[in-house]
Amino acid sequence: MINAIILINAERTKIKSVAEQLVSLDGITDVYSVSGRFDLVVVIRLPHADDLAELMTEKVIKVEGITKTESMVAFKTFSKSDIANMFELGN
């Protein structure tokens, strides 16, 4: 499994449209409209690194209205559920 985060800037009048297009793509699990330097935060979960390359170079690039992206690949995932499971008896 590969997890990635993409920070996106979009044309001001197309932020909602960009978000809707992105969330419809396979592998993109969440799209957040946020404050700060970027307009959108995209969470990606895919089985293989090759799938991420395909998503980015063949699908995300075609979404109209994106002006800038910054991509990050996660090395390890930490979540409340992961931490809770480590402290269960028998683990």
Image (cartoon, grey):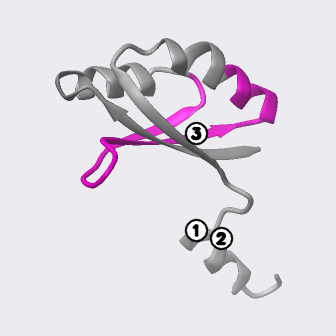
Q: Are marks 2 and 1 in contact (CB under 8 Å)?
A: yes
Question: What label sits on residue 44 in the rendered view?
Answer: 3
85 sits left or right of 50 in the view: left
Question: Which residue does the numbered mark 1 point to in the structure image?
Answer: 79
Picture residue at 44% right of the left edge, 25% below the top: 22
**What amino acid is found at the position of numbered circle 2 in the picture?**
Asp
**Gap between marks 3 and 1 measured at Cα:** 15 Å
Q: Which of the 4 image quarters holds residue 81?
A: bottom right
Q: Quadrant of the C terminus?
A: bottom right
Question: What label sits on residue 30 in the rendered view?
Answer: none
User: Residue 4, relative to residue 47: is it above or below?
Assistant: below
Magenta part of the chain: 26-54
Crowding around mark 1 (Cα neighbors within 10 Å: few <14, some 14 to 19, many 20+) is: few
Q: In this orientation, which residue lies closer to the viewer: 12 or 42?
A: 12
Secondary element type, mark 3:
strand
Secondary element type, mark 1:
loop
Q: Are marks 3 and 1 in contact (CB under 8 Å)?
A: no
Q: Where residue 46 sits in the image (x, y, percent)?
A: 69, 35
Q: Where residue 4 sits in the image (x, y, percent)?
A: 62, 45
Question: Which residue does the numbered mark 2 point to in the structure image?
Answer: 82
Q: Where residue 80 sits in the image (x, y, percent)?
A: 55, 73
Crowding around mark 2 (Cα neighbors within 10 Å: few <14, some 14 to 19, many 20+) is: few
Q: In this orientation, which residue lies closer to the viewer: 85 or 20?
A: 20
Q: Is residue 50 magenta?
A: yes
Secondary element type, mark 2:
helix
